[in-house]
Image: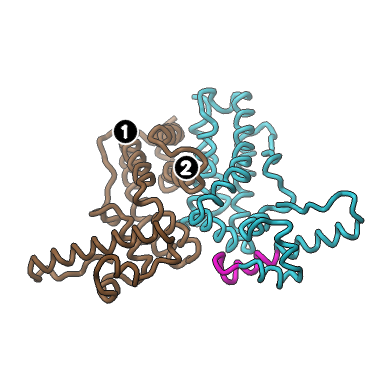
Chain colours: A cyan, B brown
Protein backbone atom coordinates (compact mmCIF):
# COMPACT_ATOMS: atom_id res chain seq x y z
CA UNK A 1 0.00 0.00 0.00
CA UNK A 2 3.01 2.32 0.20
CA UNK A 3 5.17 4.04 -2.38
CA UNK A 4 7.44 1.34 -3.74
CA UNK A 5 10.00 3.60 -5.43
CA UNK A 6 13.35 1.74 -5.43
CA UNK A 7 15.91 3.53 -3.29
CA UNK A 8 18.29 3.68 -6.26
CA UNK A 9 16.07 6.07 -8.26
CA UNK A 10 17.08 9.67 -8.70
CA UNK A 11 15.95 12.06 -5.92
CA UNK A 12 13.84 14.00 -8.46
CA UNK A 13 11.80 10.91 -9.33
CA UNK A 14 11.28 10.13 -5.65
CA UNK A 15 10.06 13.66 -5.03
CA UNK A 16 7.73 13.46 -8.03
CA UNK A 17 6.36 10.14 -6.77
CA UNK A 18 5.81 11.52 -3.28
CA UNK A 19 4.01 14.53 -4.77
CA UNK A 20 1.78 12.22 -6.83
CA UNK A 21 1.11 9.98 -3.85
CA UNK A 22 0.01 12.92 -1.70
CA UNK A 23 -2.12 14.35 -4.54
CA UNK A 24 -3.86 10.98 -4.95
CA UNK A 25 -4.56 10.65 -1.21
CA UNK A 26 -5.89 14.22 -0.99
CA UNK A 27 -8.09 13.70 -4.05
CA UNK A 28 -9.56 10.53 -2.52
CA UNK A 29 -10.35 12.37 0.73
CA UNK A 30 -12.01 15.24 -1.09
CA UNK A 31 -14.10 13.12 -3.44
CA UNK A 32 -15.40 10.73 -0.82
CA UNK A 33 -16.46 13.74 1.26
CA UNK A 34 -18.39 15.06 -1.73
CA UNK A 35 -20.08 11.94 -3.15
CA UNK A 36 -19.56 9.09 -0.65
CA UNK A 37 -17.69 5.82 -0.95
CA UNK A 38 -20.02 4.03 -3.37
CA UNK A 39 -19.56 6.77 -5.99
CA UNK A 40 -15.81 7.15 -5.46
CA UNK A 41 -13.90 5.81 -8.49
CA UNK A 42 -10.24 5.35 -9.37
CA UNK A 43 -10.95 7.37 -12.54
CA UNK A 44 -12.19 10.37 -10.53
CA UNK A 45 -9.23 10.20 -8.15
CA UNK A 46 -6.78 10.03 -11.07
CA UNK A 47 -8.43 12.97 -12.84
CA UNK A 48 -8.40 15.21 -9.78
CA UNK A 49 -4.84 14.25 -8.80
CA UNK A 50 -3.60 14.82 -12.33
CA UNK A 51 -2.14 11.32 -12.70
CA UNK A 52 -2.91 8.31 -14.88
CA UNK A 53 -5.17 5.53 -13.56
CA UNK A 54 -2.27 3.09 -13.95
CA UNK A 55 -0.23 5.06 -11.43
CA UNK A 56 -2.92 4.41 -8.84
CA UNK A 57 -3.33 0.73 -9.74
CA UNK A 58 0.44 0.29 -9.49
CA UNK A 59 0.50 1.47 -5.88
CA UNK A 60 -2.87 0.37 -4.45
CA UNK A 61 -5.05 -2.72 -5.02
CA UNK A 62 -8.40 -0.91 -4.57
CA UNK A 63 -10.11 2.41 -3.87
CA UNK A 64 -10.60 1.24 -0.27
CA UNK A 65 -6.83 0.83 0.07
CA UNK A 66 -6.25 4.36 -1.24
CA UNK A 67 -8.81 5.78 1.15
CA UNK A 68 -7.45 3.80 4.02
CA UNK A 69 -3.93 5.14 3.54
CA UNK A 70 -5.38 8.64 3.15
CA UNK A 71 -7.04 8.36 6.57
CA UNK A 72 -3.90 7.23 8.38
CA UNK A 73 -1.87 9.90 10.17
CA UNK A 74 1.08 10.65 7.87
CA UNK A 75 4.15 8.65 8.85
CA UNK A 76 2.38 6.36 11.32
CA UNK A 77 3.27 2.69 10.92
CA UNK A 78 0.68 0.65 12.86
CA UNK A 79 3.13 -2.24 13.14
CA UNK A 80 5.71 -0.26 15.09
CA UNK A 81 3.60 2.38 16.86
CA UNK A 82 4.12 2.66 20.62
CA UNK A 83 2.10 4.48 23.27
CA UNK A 84 3.89 7.07 25.41
CA UNK A 85 5.38 5.63 28.59
CA UNK A 86 6.16 8.34 31.15
CA UNK A 87 5.64 5.90 34.01
CA UNK A 88 2.20 7.41 34.76
CA UNK A 89 -0.39 5.15 33.13
CA UNK A 90 -3.32 7.53 33.75
CA UNK A 91 -1.54 10.51 32.21
CA UNK A 92 -0.37 8.44 29.24
CA UNK A 93 -3.82 7.00 28.52
CA UNK A 94 -5.38 10.46 28.68
CA UNK A 95 -2.80 11.72 26.20
CA UNK A 96 -3.55 8.89 23.79
CA UNK A 97 -7.35 9.02 24.12
CA UNK A 98 -7.36 12.81 23.69
CA UNK A 99 -5.33 12.30 20.53
CA UNK A 100 -7.91 9.78 19.31
CA UNK A 101 -10.68 12.32 19.98
CA UNK A 102 -8.77 14.91 17.94
CA UNK A 103 -8.40 12.46 15.05
CA UNK A 104 -12.07 11.46 15.12
CA UNK A 105 -13.09 15.13 15.19
CA UNK A 106 -10.79 16.24 12.36
CA UNK A 107 -13.28 17.68 9.82
CA UNK A 108 -11.08 16.75 6.87
CA UNK A 109 -11.08 13.09 7.90
CA UNK A 110 -14.65 12.67 9.16
CA UNK A 111 -16.42 11.89 5.88
CA UNK A 112 -13.76 9.46 4.59
CA UNK A 113 -13.39 7.73 7.95
CA UNK A 114 -17.15 7.21 8.21
CA UNK A 115 -17.26 6.01 4.60
CA UNK A 116 -14.52 3.50 5.33
CA UNK A 117 -16.23 2.40 8.55
CA UNK A 118 -19.45 1.83 6.59
CA UNK A 119 -17.60 -0.14 3.93
CA UNK A 120 -16.11 -2.49 6.54
CA UNK A 121 -19.70 -3.47 7.38
CA UNK A 122 -20.78 -3.93 3.77
CA UNK A 123 -17.59 -5.77 2.78
CA UNK A 124 -16.57 -8.25 5.53
CA UNK A 125 -13.32 -9.18 3.75
CA UNK A 126 -12.19 -5.53 3.65
CA UNK A 127 -13.21 -5.20 7.30
CA UNK A 128 -11.16 -8.23 8.32
CA UNK A 129 -8.11 -6.99 6.40
CA UNK A 130 -8.19 -3.55 7.98
CA UNK A 131 -8.68 -5.03 11.44
CA UNK A 132 -5.83 -7.50 11.00
CA UNK A 133 -3.34 -5.17 9.33
CA UNK A 134 -4.11 -1.85 10.99
CA UNK A 135 -6.43 -1.96 14.01
CA UNK A 136 -5.15 -5.00 15.90
CA UNK A 137 -1.46 -3.92 15.67
CA UNK A 138 -2.49 -0.59 17.21
CA UNK A 139 -4.46 -2.36 19.94
CA UNK A 140 -1.35 -4.44 20.64
CA UNK A 141 0.49 -1.19 21.38
CA UNK A 142 -2.12 -0.56 24.11
CA UNK A 143 -1.58 -4.11 25.35
CA UNK A 144 2.18 -3.51 25.67
CA UNK A 145 1.61 -0.25 27.56
CA UNK A 146 -0.86 -1.86 29.98
CA UNK A 147 1.53 -4.78 30.56
CA UNK A 148 4.26 -2.31 31.48
CA UNK A 149 1.78 -0.68 33.92
CA UNK A 150 1.02 -4.14 35.31
CA UNK A 151 4.73 -4.73 35.89
CA UNK A 152 4.90 -1.34 37.64
CA UNK A 153 2.05 -2.38 39.94
CA UNK A 154 -0.36 0.25 38.58
CA UNK A 155 -2.71 -2.35 37.10
CA UNK A 156 -3.84 -5.49 38.91
CA UNK A 157 -1.92 -8.62 37.92
CA UNK A 158 -5.06 -10.69 37.32
CA UNK A 159 -6.47 -8.38 34.62
CA UNK A 160 -6.69 -9.62 31.02
CA UNK A 161 -5.25 -6.49 29.40
CA UNK A 162 -6.39 -7.42 25.89
CA UNK A 163 -9.96 -7.11 27.16
CA UNK A 164 -9.21 -4.12 29.38
CA UNK A 165 -8.16 -1.97 26.44
CA UNK A 166 -11.61 -2.39 24.92
CA UNK A 167 -13.01 -0.50 27.93
CA UNK A 168 -10.79 2.39 26.82
CA UNK A 169 -11.29 2.46 23.06
CA UNK A 170 -14.82 1.00 22.89
CA UNK A 171 -16.62 3.93 24.54
CA UNK A 172 -14.94 6.54 22.31
CA UNK A 173 -15.69 4.59 19.17
CA UNK A 174 -19.30 3.97 20.28
CA UNK A 175 -19.91 7.68 20.90
CA UNK A 176 -18.32 8.63 17.59
CA UNK A 177 -20.23 5.99 15.65
CA UNK A 178 -23.63 6.60 17.20
CA UNK A 179 -23.38 10.38 17.64
CA UNK A 180 -25.06 10.15 21.04
CA UNK A 181 -23.17 12.87 22.92
CA UNK A 182 -20.19 15.15 22.21
CA UNK A 183 -16.78 13.54 21.85
CA UNK A 184 -14.50 15.77 23.95
CA UNK A 185 -11.21 15.70 25.84
CA UNK A 186 -13.21 15.73 29.07
CA UNK A 187 -15.03 12.60 27.95
CA UNK A 188 -11.71 10.92 27.09
CA UNK A 189 -10.39 11.78 30.57
CA UNK A 190 -13.48 10.40 32.32
CA UNK A 191 -13.33 7.14 30.34
CA UNK A 192 -9.64 6.74 31.26
CA UNK A 193 -10.40 7.44 34.93
CA UNK A 194 -13.39 5.07 35.17
CA UNK A 195 -11.58 2.28 33.34
CA UNK A 196 -8.46 2.66 35.47
CA UNK A 197 -10.51 2.52 38.68
CA UNK A 198 -11.53 -0.93 37.51
CA UNK A 199 -8.04 -2.00 36.51
CA UNK A 200 -5.99 -0.79 39.45
CA UNK A 201 -4.99 -3.20 42.25
CA UNK A 202 -7.57 -3.42 45.04
CA UNK B 1 -43.23 3.18 11.89
CA UNK B 2 -45.77 0.73 13.33
CA UNK B 3 -48.97 -0.76 11.98
CA UNK B 4 -51.56 1.96 12.26
CA UNK B 5 -54.66 -0.22 11.88
CA UNK B 6 -57.50 1.47 13.79
CA UNK B 7 -58.64 -0.63 16.72
CA UNK B 8 -62.21 -0.55 15.38
CA UNK B 9 -61.36 -2.66 12.32
CA UNK B 10 -62.58 -6.22 12.09
CA UNK B 11 -60.23 -8.81 13.66
CA UNK B 12 -59.74 -10.44 10.22
CA UNK B 13 -58.39 -7.21 8.73
CA UNK B 14 -56.07 -6.73 11.70
CA UNK B 15 -54.76 -10.27 11.29
CA UNK B 16 -54.27 -9.74 7.57
CA UNK B 17 -52.40 -6.51 8.26
CA UNK B 18 -50.20 -8.18 10.83
CA UNK B 19 -49.46 -10.99 8.37
CA UNK B 20 -48.53 -8.45 5.68
CA UNK B 21 -46.41 -6.46 8.10
CA UNK B 22 -44.43 -9.56 9.13
CA UNK B 23 -44.07 -10.67 5.49
CA UNK B 24 -42.69 -7.23 4.57
CA UNK B 25 -40.20 -7.23 7.47
CA UNK B 26 -39.03 -10.77 6.66
CA UNK B 27 -38.64 -9.92 2.98
CA UNK B 28 -36.53 -6.86 3.85
CA UNK B 29 -34.26 -8.97 6.08
CA UNK B 30 -33.83 -11.62 3.41
CA UNK B 31 -33.14 -9.24 0.55
CA UNK B 32 -30.64 -7.07 2.36
CA UNK B 33 -28.77 -10.22 3.35
CA UNK B 34 -28.61 -11.22 -0.31
CA UNK B 35 -27.80 -7.94 -2.09
CA UNK B 36 -26.91 -5.34 0.59
CA UNK B 37 -28.59 -2.11 1.57
CA UNK B 38 -27.75 -0.05 -1.51
CA UNK B 39 -29.53 -2.53 -3.79
CA UNK B 40 -32.52 -3.06 -1.49
CA UNK B 41 -35.66 -1.50 -3.02
CA UNK B 42 -39.26 -1.07 -1.90
CA UNK B 43 -40.27 -2.76 -5.17
CA UNK B 44 -38.28 -5.89 -4.35
CA UNK B 45 -39.63 -6.02 -0.80
CA UNK B 46 -43.21 -5.66 -2.07
CA UNK B 47 -42.75 -8.37 -4.69
CA UNK B 48 -41.30 -10.89 -2.26
CA UNK B 49 -43.84 -10.11 0.48
CA UNK B 50 -46.71 -10.38 -2.02
CA UNK B 51 -48.08 -6.90 -1.25
CA UNK B 52 -48.43 -3.69 -3.23
CA UNK B 53 -45.74 -1.00 -2.98
CA UNK B 54 -48.39 1.39 -1.63
CA UNK B 55 -48.93 -0.86 1.39
CA UNK B 56 -45.29 -0.37 2.33
CA UNK B 57 -45.30 3.37 1.68
CA UNK B 58 -48.43 3.71 3.84
CA UNK B 59 -46.67 2.20 6.86
CA UNK B 60 -43.03 3.27 6.50
CA UNK B 61 -41.34 6.42 5.20
CA UNK B 62 -38.26 4.68 3.73
CA UNK B 63 -36.51 1.35 3.19
CA UNK B 64 -34.26 2.21 6.14
CA UNK B 65 -37.35 2.49 8.37
CA UNK B 66 -38.59 -0.93 7.20
CA UNK B 67 -35.21 -2.50 7.85
CA UNK B 68 -34.90 -0.82 11.17
CA UNK B 69 -38.21 -2.20 12.40
CA UNK B 70 -37.25 -5.60 11.00
CA UNK B 71 -34.09 -5.62 13.13
CA UNK B 72 -35.89 -4.74 16.37
CA UNK B 73 -36.76 -7.64 18.68
CA UNK B 74 -40.50 -8.26 18.12
CA UNK B 75 -42.62 -6.46 20.71
CA UNK B 76 -39.78 -4.36 22.14
CA UNK B 77 -40.66 -0.70 22.63
CA UNK B 78 -37.39 1.20 23.19
CA UNK B 79 -39.30 3.98 24.94
CA UNK B 80 -40.61 1.74 27.73
CA UNK B 81 -37.95 -1.01 27.92
CA UNK B 82 -36.51 -1.66 31.39
CA UNK B 83 -33.49 -3.68 32.47
CA UNK B 84 -34.03 -6.52 34.93
CA UNK B 85 -33.69 -5.45 38.57
CA UNK B 86 -33.17 -8.42 40.89
CA UNK B 87 -31.22 -6.27 43.33
CA UNK B 88 -27.89 -7.75 42.10
CA UNK B 89 -26.41 -5.27 39.60
CA UNK B 90 -23.64 -7.61 38.43
CA UNK B 91 -26.03 -10.49 37.69
CA UNK B 92 -28.48 -8.15 35.95
CA UNK B 93 -25.82 -6.56 33.74
CA UNK B 94 -24.47 -9.96 32.75
CA UNK B 95 -27.99 -11.05 31.79
CA UNK B 96 -28.47 -7.97 29.63
CA UNK B 97 -25.02 -8.03 27.98
CA UNK B 98 -25.31 -11.76 27.24
CA UNK B 99 -28.66 -10.98 25.59
CA UNK B 100 -26.96 -8.29 23.50
CA UNK B 101 -24.30 -10.81 22.43
CA UNK B 102 -27.05 -13.23 21.38
CA UNK B 103 -28.76 -10.51 19.33
CA UNK B 104 -25.53 -9.43 17.65
CA UNK B 105 -24.70 -13.07 16.82
CA UNK B 106 -28.15 -13.95 15.45
CA UNK B 107 -27.30 -15.07 11.88
CA UNK B 108 -30.67 -13.90 10.54
CA UNK B 109 -30.06 -10.37 11.79
CA UNK B 110 -26.32 -9.98 11.13
CA UNK B 111 -26.41 -8.84 7.49
CA UNK B 112 -29.30 -6.36 7.95
CA UNK B 113 -27.89 -4.98 11.20
CA UNK B 114 -24.49 -4.38 9.58
CA UNK B 115 -26.18 -2.84 6.55
CA UNK B 116 -28.11 -0.48 8.80
CA UNK B 117 -24.99 0.34 10.82
CA UNK B 118 -23.17 1.19 7.58
CA UNK B 119 -26.05 3.35 6.42
CA UNK B 120 -25.97 5.41 9.63
CA UNK B 121 -22.42 6.40 8.65
CA UNK B 122 -23.28 7.24 5.05
CA UNK B 123 -26.49 9.08 5.99
CA UNK B 124 -25.92 11.23 9.11
CA UNK B 125 -29.60 12.25 9.31
CA UNK B 126 -30.71 8.61 9.42
CA UNK B 127 -28.02 7.94 12.01
CA UNK B 128 -29.20 10.80 14.22
CA UNK B 129 -32.83 9.67 13.98
CA UNK B 130 -32.06 6.09 14.96
CA UNK B 131 -29.85 7.25 17.84
CA UNK B 132 -32.47 9.68 19.13
CA UNK B 133 -35.52 7.44 18.73
CA UNK B 134 -34.11 4.01 19.42
CA UNK B 135 -30.61 3.87 20.87
CA UNK B 136 -30.66 6.68 23.44
CA UNK B 137 -34.00 5.52 24.99
CA UNK B 138 -32.43 2.09 25.46
CA UNK B 139 -29.31 3.63 26.98
CA UNK B 140 -31.59 5.55 29.37
CA UNK B 141 -32.90 2.19 30.61
CA UNK B 142 -29.29 1.36 31.56
CA UNK B 143 -29.04 4.75 33.26
CA UNK B 144 -32.14 4.01 35.38
CA UNK B 145 -30.80 0.60 36.38
CA UNK B 146 -27.40 2.03 37.38
CA UNK B 147 -29.11 4.80 39.37
CA UNK B 148 -31.06 2.17 41.26
CA UNK B 149 -27.75 0.38 41.97
CA UNK B 150 -26.29 3.70 43.11
CA UNK B 151 -29.19 4.11 45.56
CA UNK B 152 -28.55 0.58 46.79
CA UNK B 153 -24.89 1.45 47.45
CA UNK B 154 -23.56 -0.96 44.80
CA UNK B 155 -22.20 1.84 42.60
CA UNK B 156 -20.23 4.81 43.91
CA UNK B 157 -22.31 7.97 44.34
CA UNK B 158 -19.82 10.18 42.44
CA UNK B 159 -20.04 8.20 39.17
CA UNK B 160 -21.63 9.79 36.09
CA UNK B 161 -23.76 6.81 35.13
CA UNK B 162 -24.53 8.11 31.63
CA UNK B 163 -20.80 7.79 30.89
CA UNK B 164 -20.42 4.57 32.89
CA UNK B 165 -22.88 2.70 30.66
CA UNK B 166 -20.63 3.36 27.68
CA UNK B 167 -17.96 1.22 29.36
CA UNK B 168 -20.51 -1.61 29.24
CA UNK B 169 -21.97 -1.28 25.75
CA UNK B 170 -18.97 0.29 23.97
CA UNK B 171 -16.65 -2.75 24.19
CA UNK B 172 -19.31 -5.17 22.87
CA UNK B 173 -20.18 -2.89 19.99
CA UNK B 174 -16.49 -2.30 19.18
CA UNK B 175 -15.74 -6.03 19.04
CA UNK B 176 -18.81 -6.69 16.89
CA UNK B 177 -18.07 -3.82 14.54
CA UNK B 178 -14.36 -4.47 14.10
CA UNK B 179 -14.48 -8.31 14.24
CA UNK B 180 -11.29 -8.36 16.33
CA UNK B 181 -12.05 -11.31 18.62
CA UNK B 182 -15.05 -13.58 19.27
CA UNK B 183 -18.13 -12.04 20.86
CA UNK B 184 -19.10 -14.53 23.57
CA UNK B 185 -21.00 -14.74 26.87
CA UNK B 186 -17.64 -15.04 28.63
CA UNK B 187 -16.55 -11.75 27.07
CA UNK B 188 -19.81 -10.10 28.15
CA UNK B 189 -19.24 -11.33 31.71
CA UNK B 190 -15.65 -10.06 31.81
CA UNK B 191 -16.69 -6.63 30.51
CA UNK B 192 -19.41 -6.41 33.20
CA UNK B 193 -16.92 -7.46 35.91
CA UNK B 194 -14.16 -5.05 34.83
CA UNK B 195 -16.56 -2.13 34.46
CA UNK B 196 -18.20 -2.80 37.83
CA UNK B 197 -14.79 -2.94 39.55
CA UNK B 198 -14.41 0.64 38.38
CA UNK B 199 -17.90 1.71 39.38
CA UNK B 200 -18.22 0.14 42.82
CA UNK B 201 -17.62 2.22 45.98
CA UNK B 202 -13.99 2.22 47.08
Res B37 → quadrant:
bottom left
- Foreground mark, 1 or 2, reads 2
Q: Is residue A11 left or right of residue B52?
A: right
Task: Please give the name of the residue rendered at 24% of the width and 62% of the height, measured from the top-left corner.
Answer: B23
x, y percentage for residue B101? 37, 42
Q: Position of residue A45 (x, y in %)?
A: 68, 68
Establish if A48 lies above or below B108. below
Q: Verify whether residue B158 appears in magenta.
A: no
Q: Secondary structure at mark 1?
A: helix
Task: Tell me which chain the residue with mark 1 is part of.
Answer: B
Residue B117 position in % (x across, y down): 44, 57
Instruction: Give the residue pinned by disc 2.
Output: B171
Please say whether residue B200 is visible from this viewpoint.
no
- Residue A39 vs A65, above or below: the answer is below
Mark 1 in CB contact with mark 2 (< 8 angstroms): no
**Position of residue B196 measured from the top left corner of the image (x, y, whole percent):** 41, 34
What residue range appears in magenta? A26-40
Q: Which residue position holds label 1?
A: B91
Amino acid sequence: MVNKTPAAKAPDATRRNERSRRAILDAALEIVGEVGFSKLTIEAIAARAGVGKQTIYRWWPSKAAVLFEACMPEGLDPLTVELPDTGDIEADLKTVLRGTVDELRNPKLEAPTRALSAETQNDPELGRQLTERILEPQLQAYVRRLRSAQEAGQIAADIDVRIAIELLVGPLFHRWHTRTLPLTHEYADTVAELALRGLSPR
